[in-house]
Image: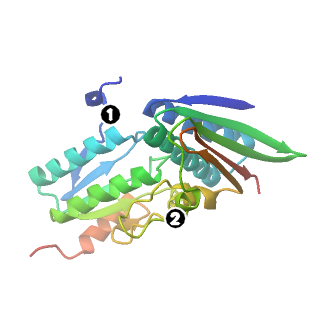
Amino acid sequence: MTAGSDAARIPLQLLRGCLVASIQIDLSDEVLHLFQQDLLIALRDRRARAVILDLSGVRILDSSDFESILRTLRMARLMGAVPVIAGLRAGIAASLVELGASAADIATCITLEQAFELMERAPRQGT
Amino acid sequence: MEYRVSIHSEPDATRAIMQTRRSAAAAGFDATRVSILGTIASELVRNILKYAVSGELIIRDLDDHGRRGLELVACDQGPGIRDIAEALKDHVSTSGTLGLGLPGVKRMTDEFRIESEVGKGTTVTIRKWLP
């Protein structure tokens, strides 16, 4: 249970050309580090045009978790995938604003379905 | 009720956060405020792990003549904070990091107290009352 390599992983799925990461577990530095690695490798291997991060299952997200997530999403964008955050809960959104966190450069939406719609309307990058 | 959770590792931090959420819900806070209290606990215990390595979170029910609330006390015997006023300033601009998260914690609470002595440790006490 304590070894770093045993940390739970966030599953990634390719749906409609978008890589979808649905976080349903408690976050830790180790989980977020593995997520960054897994996501960037999957982006390259599967040539996804967008990364949709579904946070609807996340009950606790503090400022350091959120910063780590934003850094990972910015890396994804640098590789050419459009990042979207979906499903932030009300209490988490309230806390993040009070903590001074800002994600002005990352698109957000309420549901996963809206994230797909957003991606289908968005012009493709880098063409 | 009072719970004391020793903080030495990430699993301890998770336990402390979950107990805070349970206590907040039991005290009658709504879902949004339960989540906010969970985030406050997370910021406090993460600071302990990051700066002091170990410490304790005390989660205490408050009842002031029928007015209910929750108190969190995060204490450590870490290096202490040299300049408390500086630690309570927002540092969002330059590096993009949020520093200790303490200004945000202060904004989210009704009462906030910090005591710190260099070389001795830091105690942060917060209270949030039911509306």
Q: Name the residue under label 2.
A: A97
Where is residue A22 shown, x and y percent of the image? 34, 48
Whether residue A55 appears in this view of the structure is: no
Type of colouring: rainbow
Q: Which amino acid does label 2 sit on?
A: Val
**Along the line of sight, the residue nearer the viewer: B54 or B29:** B54
In the rendered structure, the answer to whether residue B47 lies left or right of residue A46 reads right
Residue at left 34%, top 54%? A69
In the structure shown, which secondary structural element does the residue marked by tag 2 occupy?
helix
In this rendering, the answer to whether A32 lies above or below B57 is below
**Along the line of sight, the residue nearer the viewer: B89 or A124:** B89
Q: Name the residue under label 1.
A: A8
In the structure shown, which secondary structural element does the residue marked by tag 1 occupy?
loop
Residue A3 quadrant = top left
Please state the chain letter of the residue tagged with numbered disc 1 in the rendered image. A
Q: How many marks?
A: 2
Residue at left 11%, top 57%? A47
In this rendering, the answer to whether B45 lies above or below B99 is above
